[in-house]
Image (cartoon, coloured by chain):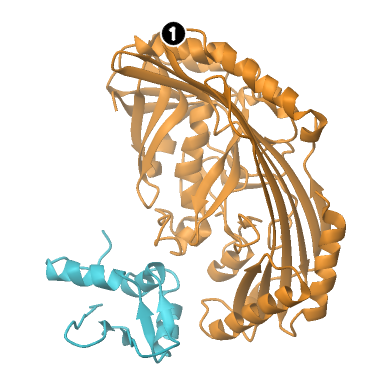
Chain colours: A cyan, B orange
């Protein structure tokens, strides 16, 4: 599992290659799925219900993620592996 | 409160606007709070709070929506219905569990707290006089710099009506008597209290039941004594916890880790997760063979007793841990459907404007066979700690550090020196395995807290813990924190 964040685009992008899940923020949309940190982590860490959450997110056209995305990006920039539980 | 007619009117108006959906429920809640306090001999402004509102839940097309409102007119209820229905349709297909899989058996029932001395049966003047008298008894020395006595009474009436024919009315009367006394000399100050953990269901009779009317002289003397007491010793030794510390130990390192929504990962945002995982139930050794923990909303006086939870599931006494083995989580009907694990009736909401989530209710440590005297005699070197005053525990409710107001060194089976600032630390996953003796039924104290916080948006709720004193071997103890 390898989350990837692209700061150059006008979106926050998570790409989970193993699970084929993309999450991104589209600021122009009025309605989209919001993932809070608890839900987002179900995609990032292996645990109960991750498959169902991944299915729901994968079926969604537009997704907003919580501020954890920003924290994860900061962590990655500092060299932390944000994919593994500590 | 004039609830009967009002509740019936609300339900009647709601039925006129109820949605055509797979399922709906209406939960009406009316609550009145009264706070009385005397601090440093001065009567504080009495406070009364009144609150009335409803929560509408709608399940439609595989989604669930909630809408709370305090506008209980027909138009207000219609707006709430429309909003809940809208949310249900938005969440359809996007839920981790299909709400149609949650059992919704029709239930009719009622519950009422047992009250011997109603709050209204004693005048405001007489209640304030009781507080004044306790306050005067606390101020027994010039070194007493802060002292207070207070009563917090809450009466709540709830009515749950569902599209499947359920109708459950419950009323709760709770009294939380509080005493606090702080002594100071030089740079040292010490506080003793009877408070946060002494609430029960009932009326003014709770004051005597929890020792409110007799504790003041002892608390003041102990606060003064602690001023000149040495710090708690440091080292690995036996630890004997009084019930008013056991309440916190059970709450934080058994109660919260067993909440099924935490285990399923819902609470990471705020309250945290759990070191417990779903595969542990049925086999995991949580503690020594002396550890028996029950979910028990059936004890009349305990603060979180009820007959049905806020989703209408009938509440029953259930072992969560038996002979040290973990059996069940604290999970309501929805969490049970998500996880496939058997749970308990613990879906509870803090008010009308919150949806039910997995809470503790009454979580009790079942008594053993030892007297307090037996436990003290069984200690060669250790500390007896009373009354929680600080707590810190990690987000998976595993590693913890707790502090108490008062300690006493135990040497060769006897209580010795009083010590101040006693603390201990441990790890939930191993701490309970060091449980060596458990107090007999006559040592159990019916305690709890009115301030258990969890959920986003936050829900502060009452939870009960009936607990005996317990002895633990080989615990890391320290002072001065």
Q: Position of residue B145 (x, y in %)?
A: 43, 17
Drawn side of residue A71 relative to residue B100, left or right: left
Front residue of A76/B132: it is B132
Counting every numbered tag in the picture gives 1
Front residue of B122/B81: it is B122
Front residue of B68/B431: it is B68
Q: Position of residue B293 (x, y in %)?
A: 57, 41
Drawn side of residue B467 relative to residue B125, left or right: left
Drawn side of residue B430 relative to residue B263, left or right: left
Secondary element under disc 1, as helix, strand or loop, is: loop
Name the quadrant containing residue B253. Answer: top left
Drawn side of residue B75 relative to residue A7, left or right: right
Q: Residue visible at 50% across and 32% down?
A: B246
Q: Residue visible at 58% across and 18% down?
A: B135
Q: Residue visible at 66% across and 82% down?
A: B82
Q: Chain of mark 1?
A: B
Query: For the residue carrying disc 1, how many other residues have a C-alpha within 10 Å: few (<14), some (14-19), or many (20+)?
Result: few
Name the quadrant containing residue B143. Answer: top left
Residue B442 visible in the snapshot: yes
Q: Is residue B262 positioned above or below B174 on the image?
A: below
Quarter of the figure with the C terminus of chain B: top left
Q: Position of residue A65 (x, y in %)?
A: 35, 77
Residue A83 visible in the snapshot: no
Name the residue tied to disc 1: B142
């Amino acid at each position: 599992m390898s989350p990837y964040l692209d700061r150059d685009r006008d979106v926050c992008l998570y790409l989970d290659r193993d699970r084929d899940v993309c999450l991104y923020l589209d600021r122009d949309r009025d309605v989209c799925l919001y993932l809070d940190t608890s839900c987002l982590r179900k995609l990032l860490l292996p645990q109960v219900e991750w498959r169902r959450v991944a299915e729901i997110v994968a079926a969604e056209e537009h997704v907003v993620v919580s501020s954890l995305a920003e924290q994860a990006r900061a962590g990655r920039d500092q060299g932390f592996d944000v994919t593994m539980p500590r | 409160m004039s609830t009967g007619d009002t509740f019936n009117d609300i339900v009647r108006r709601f039925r006129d606007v109820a949605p055509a959906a797979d399922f709906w429920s209406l939960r009406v809640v009316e609550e009145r709070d009264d706070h009385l306090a005397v601090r440093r001999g001065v009567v504080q402004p009495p406070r009364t709070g009144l609150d009335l509102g409803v929560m509408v839940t709608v399940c439609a097309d595989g989604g669930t929506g909630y809408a709370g409102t305090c506008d209980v007119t027909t138009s207000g209820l219609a707006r709430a219905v429309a909003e809940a229905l809208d949310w249900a349709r938005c969440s359809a297909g996007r839920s981790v569990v299909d709400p149609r899989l949650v059992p919704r058996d029709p239930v009719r029932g009622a519950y009422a707290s047992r009250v011997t001395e109603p709050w209204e049966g004693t005048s405001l003047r007489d209640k304030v006089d009781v507080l004044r008298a306790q306050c005067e008894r606390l101020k027994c020395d010039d070194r007493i710099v802060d002292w207070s006595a207070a009563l917090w009474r809450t009466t709540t009436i709830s009515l749950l009506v569902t599209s499947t024919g359920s109708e459950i009315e419950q009323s709760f009367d709770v009294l939380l008597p509080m005493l606090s006394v702080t002594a100071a000399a030089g740079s040292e100050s010490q506080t003793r209290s009877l408070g946060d953990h002494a609430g029960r269901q009932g009326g003014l009779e709770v004051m005597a039941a929890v020792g409110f009317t007799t504790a003041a002289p002892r608390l003041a003397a102990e606060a003064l004594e602690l001023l000149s007491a040495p710090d708690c010793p440091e080292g690995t030794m036996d630890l004997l916890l009084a019930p008013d510390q056991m309440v916190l130990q059970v709450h934080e390192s058994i109660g919260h880790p067993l909440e099924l929504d935490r285990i399923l990962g819902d609470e990471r945002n705020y309250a945290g997760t759990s070191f417990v995982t779903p595969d542990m139930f049925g086999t995991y050794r949580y503690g020594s063979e002396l550890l028996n923990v029950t979910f028990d909303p059936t004890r009349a006086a305990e603060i979180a007793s009820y007959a049905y939870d806020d989703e209408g599931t009938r509440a029953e006494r259930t072992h969560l841990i038996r002979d040290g083995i973990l059996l069940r989580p604290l999970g309501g009907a929805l969490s049970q459907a998500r996880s496939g694990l058997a749970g308990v009736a613990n879906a509870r909401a803090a008010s009308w404007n919150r949806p039910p989530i997995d809470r503790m209710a009454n979580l009790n440590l079942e008594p053993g066979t030892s007297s307090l005297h037996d436990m003290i005699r069984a200690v060669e070197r250790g500390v007896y700690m009373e009354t929680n005053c600080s707590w810190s525990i990690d987000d998976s409710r595993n590693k913890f550090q707790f502090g108490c107001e008062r300690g006493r060194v135990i040497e060769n089976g006897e209580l010795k020196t009083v010590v101040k600032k006693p603390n201990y630390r441990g790890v939930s996953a191993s701490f309970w395995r060091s449980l060596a003796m458990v107090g007999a039924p006559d040592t159990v104290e019916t305690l709890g807290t009115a301030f258990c916080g969890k959920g986003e948006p936050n829900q502060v709720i009452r939870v009960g813990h009936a607990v005996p004193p317990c002895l633990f071997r080989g615990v890391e103890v320290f002072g001065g924190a």
